[in-house]
Each structure stands twice: as structure tokens, then as C-alpha cells.
Image (cartoon, rainbow, N blue to C red):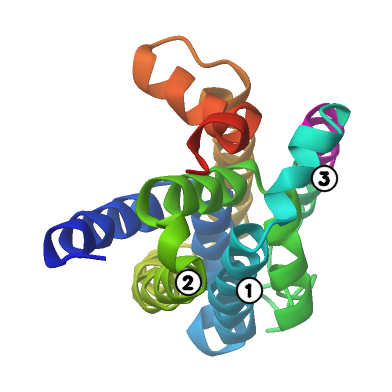
Amino acid sequence: MTSTILFAFVGFAFVSSITPGPNNMMLLASGANFGLRRSLPHMLGIAIGFTVMIVLVGFGLAGIFEVLPIMHTVLMIGSVIYLLYLSWKIATAAPKLDSGAEAGTPFTFLQAAAFQWVNPKAWMMALSAITLYVNDDQRIVGVLLVALVFGAINLPCITIWAWLGVQVRRYLNTPGRLRLFNWTMAVLLVASLYPILFPHDADQAGAARALQGMVQTGQN
């Protein structure tokens, strides 16, 4: 990977990691409800789980969509169902301010890592990174470099979202405000699927094709 390509990849990794998506919406809600320290396993699960995902995708796991095209539909349906479930959990996870106890628990490390496999944005980020920035002539080195760089950039980006949630928390000092915030986060989490499930403009369509067709056309 040349320095020019590496610079372009760093920009891609930063933009795709910092922009809103299921992971970031969930971390914003987690920071507001549970604080930064209790959200740390969630953050590490995302960063490390996504790094492992890139490695496995880069070494051929993405080929499952070529061999079994129906898996794309299965993934999308499963993702929607699970995200709707998570949205409901967020909407009903308001802390009990009067007693100091908290309803619900933050994501564990393993839950956050496993979530990457049903996160459509994570799939598109991984497939796009491997397709655009890994050369088949040096595939092993390229995949490992992409995974490590992406992981190093992803963790600070997602930490910002959890930190923002912590900052918002000081204003959520009444049950009504907390309920409104959590319901808003739940709606935004569901809305984050819209560009993936209903791509209308060229950029969104290209992103969706990363999950549907990049494996067939870009692995060279």
C-alpha cells in the first residue's frame, strides 16, 4: 500500500467510523444511560470485534455471498429484526433517578463484538475496505494492515459518541427527559438503516452494492 493509498484509506476509515450508524447511536445512548466507564466494554467490543471481522472478511469469508446469494437477504432480515429489538431495549432503558439504580445493563464486550455480524454498516465498511484498499498480490499483509489501521481509527471515533452521551446525561435529570432521549435514540437507531435498505441516490446505491456485489467485481 503506497503512502497515497494509505492516506486515502485513513480518510475513509475516519469518515465511516465517525458518521452516525447503529454502533454510534447505541454508544450515544449507552453513555447517557450508563456513563463512559460502564460503556467501555461496549466500545472495545465494537473496535476489536470489527477488526476481527475485517480480517475474516479479507481472508475469504465474504465469498459466502457469492456462493449463497440468499445470505444477503437473510442478513438484512436478521439485522432489521435485531435492531428493532435493540431499539425497544434502548427506549425502555431509562435509569431510576430517584433511587440511583439503573434499569437495564450496557452491552458486554462479547455482545458488542457479535453485533458487528448483524450490523449492515459494519459489513459495508469491511467489504469496501478490503475491496478498495487490499491488493491481491500482497493480500495477507494488506488485510492485516487494513484491519489494524481501521481498528486504531475506529476506537477513538466511537469513543467520541459515548463521551457525547455522557455530556448529554447532565441534562437528563428528570424521568421525562430520559424517556424522551431514549425514545429519540431508538428512533434514530432504526432510521440509521434507511440509507442501507432504501438507497436512492448514487452514493447510497454504491454503498448498498458493497454488500451485494463487491465480492464478485472488486476482489482483484
Please state the horizontal and vertical placement of residue 121, each as a whole percent of the image.
56, 44
Q: Disc 2 vs disc 3: which is toward the camera?
A: 2
Determine crowd level at label 1: few under 14, some 14-19, many 20+ residues with C-alpha closer than 10 A.
Answer: some
Most frequent secondary structure within the magenta stretch: helix
Q: The residue tagged with tag 1: helix, strand or loop?
A: helix
Q: Earlier in the sequence, mark 3 or mark 1?
A: 1
Q: Which mark is residue 52?
A: 1
Task: Reply yes or no: does residue 148 show up in magenta.
Answer: no
Q: Quadrant of residue 124?
A: top right
User: Counting residues from the N terminus, which is met first, the one under dot 2 or under dot 3?
Assistant: 3
Residues at badges 1 and 2 in contact (C-beta under 8 Å)?
yes
Identify the residue shown where x is 25% and y is 62%. Answer: 10
Tell me the quarter of the image containing the N terminus: bottom left
Amino acid type at circle 1 is Val
From the viewer's perspective, is 27 left or right of 104?
left
- Kindly tell me whether residue 202 is visible in this rendering: yes
- Residue closer to the observer: 45 or 27: 45
Instruction: Give the Cα separation between the discs numbered 3 and 1.
Output: 21 Å
CA–CA distance between discs 1 and 2? 7 Å
Q: Residue at x 54, y 25 (%)?
A: 209
